[in-house]
Image (cartoon, grey):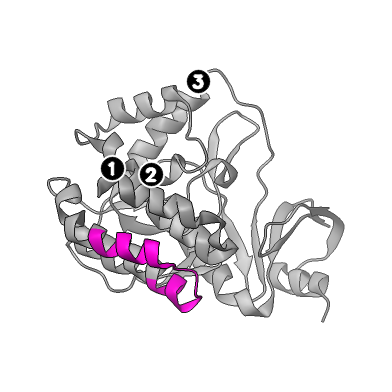
Amino acid sequence: MSSEKHIEKLLGEKIKNVLMLGGGCIGNARKIETVSGRILFVKSYSDTNKFIIRNEANGLKELRKANAIKVPDVIALNDEILILEYIEIGKRQNNFSELFGIQLAKLHKYYTEYFGFYENNFIGATPQININRTKNWSEFYWTERLLFQFRLAESKNLVNDKLRKCFLEFEKIYPKIIEGTEEKPSLIHGDLWNGNFMVSVNGKPVLIDPAVYYGHREAELGMTFLFGGFDRVFYEAYNIEYPLITGWQERIPLYKLYHVLNHMNLFGTSYLSQAIEIIKKYC
């Protein structure tokens, strides 16, 4: 059965038009119009990535529960295809950054009891371990985020002696860095950078491509700084809506480290020196 036939079967109606869109590194995307006039967004993945579809759909549904910021509706899915509400792209209004900061802060006020999530998912194409849930953020972030990525890099022969030595030293001082920052587990997007949000036709922020779990909200902000950060107004508006713990800026590199290690695992040793540099900020 062709891909379009699969889509028609999921929707229960025929497709009228298809427009191919730019895809990411692990999937393809298209805009479709059905005979009834519905405009929808369709993502498809290879068989090797079929679990990503259900994880992405579950992540979007979880974000929607907070009723804080727009995410696309999940229309239908199977192991190869994810059909979402189509979001028409618009332009930022003057208050966009302020609104985005406020809405993200409201998302982070949606809590649960344990750090983690009811299922494992992916950060990019790398598995992200969530099911070992705990009330201890320091333990969760070290074991399920930093140590997991480090061991994965070792298994790929990406770790040199310098990084290994730094990481072992870092393990000793890590508890002190994170001490005193305890908060409730917040619902976070998990992979929030400039490529994973949109501006809707009415000028409002829309979150896409999540790697959802319940974590410390500073971990979310750490990712926003990985590729240069968002603008000053965004962080100021966030901090007014939901004030951050004193010293949060000094912990941003700690939370960037997870994503730098992940990028090393995905793209190779070009990220090795950046990982070492981050660790040396604390050692």
Q: Residue at x 46, y 78 (%)?
A: 155
User: In this view of the protein, can residue 173 be seen by the observer?
Assistant: yes
* Amino acid type, label 1: Arg
Residue 143, placed above or below residue 90: below
Viewer-proximal residue among 145 and 158: 158
Query: Label 2's element?
Result: helix
Q: In the image, is residue 158 part of the stretch drawn in magenta?
A: yes
Q: CA distance from mark 2 to mark 3?
A: 23 Å
Q: Residue at x 67, y 60 (%)?
A: 25
* Amino acid type, label 3: Asn
The quarter of the displayed image where residue 50 is located: bottom right
Q: Are marks 1 and 2 in contact (CB under 8 Å)?
A: yes
Q: Magenta segment range?
A: 151-169
Q: In the image, is residue 241 part of the stretch drawn in magenta?
A: no
Viewer-proximal residue among 64 and 155: 155
Q: Which residue is mark 2?
A: 222
Q: CA distance from mark 1 to mark 2?
A: 8 Å
Query: Label 3's element?
Result: loop
What's the mark number on residue 200? Answer: none
Q: Earlier in the sequence, mark 1 or mark 2?
A: 2
Q: Which residue is mark 3?
A: 95
- In the image as oriented, which residue stretches furthest toward the right? 16
Q: Residues within 10 Å of mark 2 (few under 14, many from 20)?
A: many
Residue 107, placed above or below residue 229: below
Q: Residue at x 35, y 24 (%)?
A: 236
Measured from the top left, where is residue 33 in percent x and y? 80, 54
